[in-house]
Image: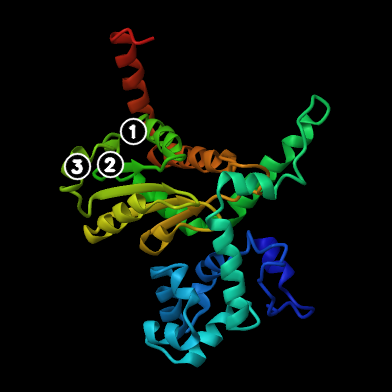
Amino acid sequence: MPTEQEARRDGAGNDAPRSGGANDAGASEDSPATRIRERMGECTPGERKVARALLAAYPVAGFETVAGLADIAGVSGATVVRFATKLGYLGFPDFQRALRDEFEHRSASPMSLYERTSRSRRAASPDDLAALGEAPAEDIRATFAGVPAHDFETTIATLAQEKRRVWITGGRYSHFLAEYLGASLQQLRPAVQMVPSMASVRGAAMADFGPKDVLIAFDFRRYEDATRDLVRFAKTRKAFVVLITDKWVSPCASDADTVLTSVAAERGPFDSVVPVMAIIEALFEGLVAKLGQPARERMARIEETVQQLDLL
């Protein structure tokens, strides 16, 4: 995140190595996964091999020894160590400390979150409602500050191609977000549908997956194997994959073409969906602008159909 990058600057304006261990106040937001994605473009070819090896089996690969990770990536141990320092860590052990801290956050249950945030939690009252709105607003600002413009614009451009079929999937708690995005996109373009939940129907639908398909996957911490399997399958069929995830970054990121990450501070047993909804609204607005007149005409046809069928 920009504020974390500024915090890592030394007096000369250069990036200074900085510990990312569990005692780091910004560790939950400034995670190893985030740094890997942000700094991939600054890496040498050898260092990019390390980055790809980590993302392909994240976070497990990061707990290998230096020699073990070097063997997986096909590079020298020195390259692994240089990669860790390029990410801003004091060395490979410091990188692994940050990774352990991130893993704890990624696998947190609602009960553990409740206990972890109990000291800072305060009861809502009519006197502090305005103050309670400040944290979600900050989450939204942090989210849009961290979303890569390239990924957002590429997602919009891909969704605007009406010859593509768009499939959307979510998890146990994010399914309703996926359905909301699906209902929104259906107003603007045809061939938008949810990935079927019934196994036999899903198999039939996915059998025809190909390069003209787009899969939008919602995957948040306590990441789900079913979503990971679906994303991997989509990539084998050369479909375009959009991942909407949290600041700890789903393992699906290594197979996604674009990644849109929401940022929410821990304030209770469940992560806030406010920044995710803001991303959905931004996608809708961006697609409206990109499609222009065809989107307006489709909305008019839908309204006319609703009136004809007396659905209101």
Between the residue at mark 3 and the residue at mark 1, the CA separation in whole angstroms equals 27 Å
Q: Residue 294: which numbered mark, if any?
A: 1
Between the residue at mark 3 and the residue at mark 2, the CA separation in whole angstroms equals 19 Å
Mark 2 nearby-residue class (10 Å; few <14, some 14–19, many ≥20): some
Q: Amino acid at mark 2?
A: Glu
Question: Residue 151, relative to residue 267: is it above or below?
Answer: below
Asked whether the residues under the numbered discs 2 and 1 touch, taking CB atoms below 8 Å apart as contact, a structural biologist would say: yes
Q: Give percent across and percent down for residue 225.
A: 36, 53
Residue denoted by label 2: 162
On the rendered image, what quadrant is the N terminus found in? bottom right
Q: Residue at x 61, y 70 (%)?
A: 98
Is residue 45 visible in this depiction of the protein?
no
Comparing 182 with 307, the one in front is 182
Disc 2 secondary structure class: loop
Mark 1 nearby-residue class (10 Å; few <14, some 14–19, many ≥20): few
Q: Residue 259: which numbered mark, if any?
A: none
Question: Quarter-wise, where is residue 267 in the image?
Answer: top right
Q: Residue 205: which numbered mark, if any?
A: 3
Q: Residue at x 48, y 40 (%)?
A: 280
User: Would residue 71 be found to the left or right of residue 204 on screen?
Assistant: right
Q: Residue at x 39, y 58 (%)?
A: 252
Disc 1 secondary structure class: helix
Comparing 234 with 183, the one in front is 234
User: Would residue 125 be found to the left or right of residue 171 on screen?
Assistant: right
Question: Quarter-wise, where is residue 299 in the image?
Answer: top left
